Image (tube, rainbow, N blue to C red):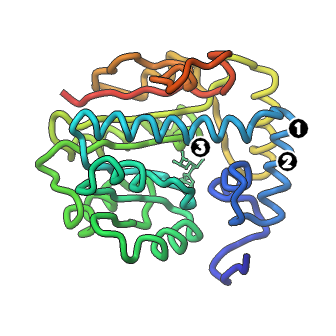
């Protein structure tokens, strides 16, 4: 694809490396170089990216079926079919979705894709500045903030080491949402294969992308004061699977869904 001058394509970007693993076309040589270096450490990384997308899809379907019809999706990524709004609106066309990402390429693609989609908006903003997200008129213009919202933070917090305390930004966003809102999280872990994950993270760090894994306890702590819903914080392949996985640890991610009381 052609790059606009706004994008620095000479360095790897998280959204585009992930797009490469998912088989997308919105990536550049630097992204593919890092993507391949990480695949050398963990050959099943593309399958794990798909497992993460699959969790997002299952969570979206489960949420709409539970009566939660509004979504705030932070770190939404380069549009990948099917997108969250497509999955959720297929069940209930009244579903409303606000996507947020900080990558300029995601902004360009998302705005183009969403121009004519009712009830869906994109805010170009950063998780680390929740006040900017909350103050954007598109948020209150799209979502009814007096009714429960599902805050989706899917494969995002691994860019922030513990000392940056990413859970505080999640908590700040949740504080603006009413009781009954939900929090969906997924996150890579080294628990199932420490050596391979350490090598993959080292490749990312060498390319300038800070990437950390979290243990199950560290992942669970990200939910803060919310109440984890069944089945809890679990290996991603085992979170309400459509069909039981042959190996519960096949994808090196944890996932969970919680309720704000
Ligand atoms: C691995 S992708 C996950 C995409 C999608 N949530 C999914 O799970 O399929 C991570 C996304 O987070 C975005 N991102 C990274 N840091 C961010 C930040 N500080 N604020 C907002 N988005 C961020 C990246 O641009 C990328 O699109």
- State yes or no: discs 1 and 2 in contact (Cβ < 8 Å): yes
Dot 1 lies on which element?
helix
Q: Which residue is mark 3?
A: 159
Q: Which residue is mark 2?
A: 36
Q: Position of residue 112 (x, y in %)?
A: 48, 76
Residue in the image at 40% along x and 16% along y: 231
Mark 3 residue CB less than 8 A from any atom of ligand 1: yes
Residue in the image at 57% along x and 60% along y: 78
What is the C-alpha distance between the residues marked 3 and 1? 20 Å
Left or right? Give the position of 60 relative to 245.
left
Residue in the image at 59% along x and 43% along y: 159
Dot 2 lies on which element?
helix
- Mark 3 vs mark 2: which is more N-terminal? 2
Left or right? Give the position of 12 relative to 223.
right
Which tag is nearer the camera, tag 3 or tag 1?
Answer: 1
Does residue 103 appear in the picture of this structure?
A: yes
- Give the position of the C terminus as an image quadrant: top left
- State yes or no: discs 3 and 2 in contact (Cβ < 8 Å): no
Does residue 128 appear in the picture of this structure?
A: no
Tell me, for residue 101, which label it has, or none. none
Which tag is nearer the camera, tag 3 or tag 2?
Answer: 2
How many other residues sit within 10 Å of disc 1, few (<14), some (14-19) or many (≥20)? Answer: some
Dot 3 lies on which element?
helix
- Mark 3 vs mark 1: which is more N-terminal? 1
How many other residues sit within 10 Å of disc 2, few (<14), some (14-19) or many (≥20)? Answer: some
Q: Which residue is mark 1?
A: 40
Farthest residue toward the left?
Answer: 146
Question: Looking at the image, how many numbered discs can be counted on the residues?
Answer: 3
> Is 112 drawn above or below residue 212 in the view shown?
below
How many other residues sit within 10 Å of disc 3, few (<14), some (14-19) or many (≥20)? Answer: some
């Amino acid at each position: 694809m052609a790059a606009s001058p706004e994008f620095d394509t000479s360095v790897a970007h998280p959204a585009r490396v992930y797009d490469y693993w998912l088989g997308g076309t919105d990536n550049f040589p630097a992204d593919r170089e890092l993507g391949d270096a990480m695949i050398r450490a963990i050959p099943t990384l593309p399958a794990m990216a798909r497992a993460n997308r699959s969790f997002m899809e299952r969570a979206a379907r489960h949420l709409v079926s539970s009566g939660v019809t509004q979504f705030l999706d932070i770190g939404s990524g380069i549009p990948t079919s099917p997108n969250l709004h497509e999955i959720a609106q297929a069940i209930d066309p009244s579903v409303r979705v606000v996507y947020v990402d900080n990558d300029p390429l995601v902004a360009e693609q998302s705005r183009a894709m969403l121009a004519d989609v009712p009830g869906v908006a994109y805010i170009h903003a950063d998780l680390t500045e929740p006040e900017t997200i909350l103050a954007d008129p598109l948020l209150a213009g799209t979502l009814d903030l007096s009714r429960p919202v599902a805050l989706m933070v899917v494969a995002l917090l691994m860019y922030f080491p513990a000392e940056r305390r990413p859970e505080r930004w999640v908590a700040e966003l949740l504080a603006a949402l009413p009781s009954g809102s939900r929090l969906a999280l997924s996150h890579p872990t080294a628990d199932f294969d420490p050596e391979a994950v350490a090598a993959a993270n080292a490749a990312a760090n060498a390319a300038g992308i800070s990437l950390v894994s979290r243990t199950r306890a560290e992942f669970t702590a990200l939910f803060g004061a919310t109440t984890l819903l069944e089945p809890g914080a679990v290996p991603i392949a085992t979170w309400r699977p459509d069909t039981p996985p042959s190996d519960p640890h096949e994808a090196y991610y944890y996932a969970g869904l919680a309720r704000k009381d």
